[in-house]
């Protein structure tokens, strides 16, 4: 299964990569690698992970970085609603659900 970003999720994701790379050379690449691993798991078994907002918004946490991928599984793709920090601005992305 493929995935796409909600249009508002793209800049926040890119900002996170840039932030980590600015902290330490190579850390942005580590973030990207972990994101890829999370998305591989989600794409393989999208209905397996925790419900964030019933009935269909789910989340999966990164292991090393304090983020969740918030997503909706559709028939042919995964829609990434946010790559949200685990401890900041809870549910700021919830308005994206109906878009």
Image (cartoon, rainbow, N blue to C red):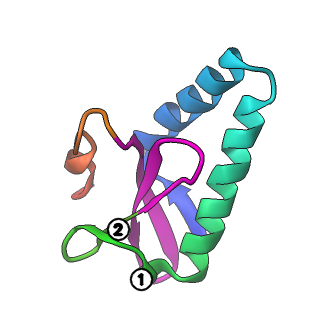
- Report the front residue among 66 and 8: 66
* Horizontal side of residue 57 vs 42, given as left or right: left
Figure check: 56 above or below 71? below
In the picture, the quarter occupied by the C terminus is bottom left
Magenta stretch contains residue 5: no
Q: Exactly how many numbered labels are in the figure?
A: 2
Q: Position of residue 3 (x, y in %)?
A: 56, 64
Residue 96 appears in the rendering: yes
Q: Position of residue 54 (x, y in %)?
A: 19, 73
**Residue at far front of view:** 64
Residue in view at x 51 percent, y 39 percent: 10
Figure check: 99 above or below 29? below
Residue in view at x 64 percent, y 26 percent: 20
Q: Secondary structure at mark 2?
A: strand
Magenta residues, dominant SS class:
strand
Magenta stretch contains residue 76: yes
- Report the front residue among 92 and 1: 92
Residue 1 appears in the rendering: no
**Residue at far right of view:** 26
Which residue bears the numbered disc 1? 47
Q: Which badge, 1 or 2, comes first in the chain's sequence?
A: 1
Q: Residues within 10 Å of mark 2 (few under 14, many from 20)?
A: many
Contact flag, marks 1 and 2 (Cβ < 8 Å): yes
Q: Secondary structure at mark 1?
A: helix
Mark 1–mark 2 distance (CA, rounded to whole Å): 8 Å
Which residue bears the numbered disc 2? 58
Q: Position of residue 79 (x, y in %)?
A: 45, 62
Which region shows up in magenta?
A: 60-86
* Horizontal side of residue 36 vs 91, given as left or right: right
Q: Position of residue 28 (x, y in %)?
A: 71, 32
Residue in view at x 41 percent, y 77 percent: 74
Residue in view at x 20 percent, y 47 percent: 95
């Amino acid at each position: 299964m493929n995935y796409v970003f909600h249009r508002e999720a793209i800049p926040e994701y890119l900002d996170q990569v840039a932030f980590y790379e600015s902290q330490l050379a190579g850390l942005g690449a580590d973030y990207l690698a972990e994101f890829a691993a999370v998305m591989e798991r989600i794409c393989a078994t999208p209905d397996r992970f925790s419900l964030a907002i019933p009935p269909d918004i789910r989340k999966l946490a990164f292991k090393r970085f304090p983020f969740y991928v918030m997503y909706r599984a559709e028939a042919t793709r995964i829609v990434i609603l946010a790559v949200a920090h685990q401890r900041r601005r809870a549910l700021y992305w919830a308005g994206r659900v109906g878009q």
